[in-house]
Image: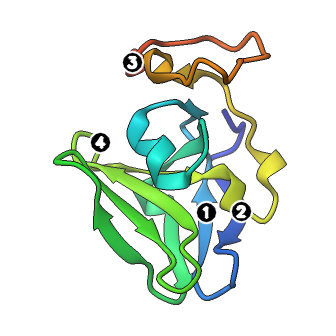
Amino acid sequence: MATTATVELNGGCLCGAVRYAVTAAPLDSGYCHCRICQRNTGAPAVAYAEIPVEGFAFTAGAPKVYRSSANGLRHFCGDCGTPLSFRARQAPRTVAVNLASLDDPAAVPPRRHIWTGSRIPWFEIADDLPRHADEPPLE
């Protein structure tokens, strides 16, 4: 992903009540097509970046937390509802950030598609990024 160990990215919710900073280079990025992400955002896919947990911090406001499954916690703004991040039980050292919530979402381009087995049929993938029917392989 990034070429340096530290970065400076900021993001937050639509209304500005919750803000966060990313200070570590993303470990991975992609589009998730799972049904939980679809229902969480109301979108056919979610662009995300995996960040080392020590390189992520909420800097203003406090997000609401929702346990969306036995596997994960989702953080969102309690005022405007913007989905911000996801923490998976099986990956306690990372936090997944919704790329569209970054101030500069173009700074971290997606590298693959995951959970394409749940892709909504009318949503065509128009790129040639690698595709995984479920979870991506460990690198």
Name the residue tied to disc 3.
134
Q: Decide if residue 87 is on the left or right side of residue 46.
A: left
Residues marked 4 and 1 touching at CB (< 8 Å): no
In space, the residues marked 4 and 2 are separated at their CA atoms by 22 Å
Element type where label 3 sits in the image: loop
**Can you tell which mark lies on residue 91?**
4
Earlier residue among tags 4 and 3: 4
Name the residue tied to disc 2.
9
Say above or below: 102 vs 48.
Answer: below
Among the 4 quarters of the image, the one containing residue 19: bottom right
Among the 4 quarters of the image, the one containing residue 97: bottom right
Residues marked 1 and 2 touching at CB (< 8 Å): yes
| Amino acid type at mark 3 | Asp
Name the residue tied to disc 1.
22
Earlier residue among tags 4 and 1: 1
Earlier residue among tags 3 and 2: 2
> Residue 25 in the image: x percent, y percent?
62, 47
